[in-house]
Image: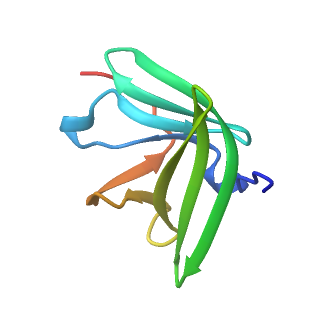
Amino acid sequence: AEASIPADLVGEWSTTTKLYAGRGFRIQPDTITLFMGNGIYERHRISDVQKTAAGDSTNYQVTYLDRDRPVVFGFWYVSSPGPVIRLPHQPAITWKKGGPITSN
């Protein structure tokens, strides 16, 4: 399937939660970069994007290739109040666009 990242998602996403200082992700039209802290990051090519809308939220399933192996990065994009991204395994933490992704 064709990868299509909407403009609203393009940018650097970070959180003010101290536990995740230096972590975050950069979404671009054809790549996703994951920042793991301590200056460590990985950039991957996006191969597929699936989305399902539910009210003011949209669930995205972004598939990228890690050493030719498909990996799914799933998240909820919430347009209001926000916009914010929430990850399914930590819904209380909000990720906001505009970074910067800095380490403390």
Look at the picture and state if 57 lies above or below 74: below
In the image, 55: left or right of 39? right
Q: Residue at x 62, y 52 (%)?
A: 9
Res. 101 visible in picture: no
In the image, 71: left or right of 40? right
Instruction: Compare residues 88 and 97 and report the one nearer the observer.
Output: 88
| Image spot of residue 88 (x, y percent) | 35, 61
User: Split into 4 quadrants, where in the image is the N terminus?
Assistant: bottom right
Coloring basis for residues: rainbow
Q: Give the total number of marks visible in the rendering.
A: 0
Q: Residue furthest front?
A: 69
Res. 70 visible in picture: yes
| Image spot of residue 78 (x, y percent) | 48, 68
The quadrant where residue 22 appears:
top left
Q: Residue furthest right?
A: 2
Q: Residue furthest bottom?
A: 55
Q: Residue at x 60, y 48 (%)?
A: 63
| Image spot of residue 71 (x, y percent) | 52, 43
User: Split into 4 quadrants, where in the image is the C terminus?
Assistant: top left
Look at the picture and state if 51 lies above or below 101: below
Instruction: Compare residues 84 and 74 and report the one nearer the observer.
Output: 74
Q: Residue at x 34, y 43 (%)?
A: 15
Q: Residue at x 70, y 44 (%)?
A: 47
The quadrant where residue 35 appears:
top left
In the image, 60: left or right of 1? left
Q: Residue furthest top?
A: 39
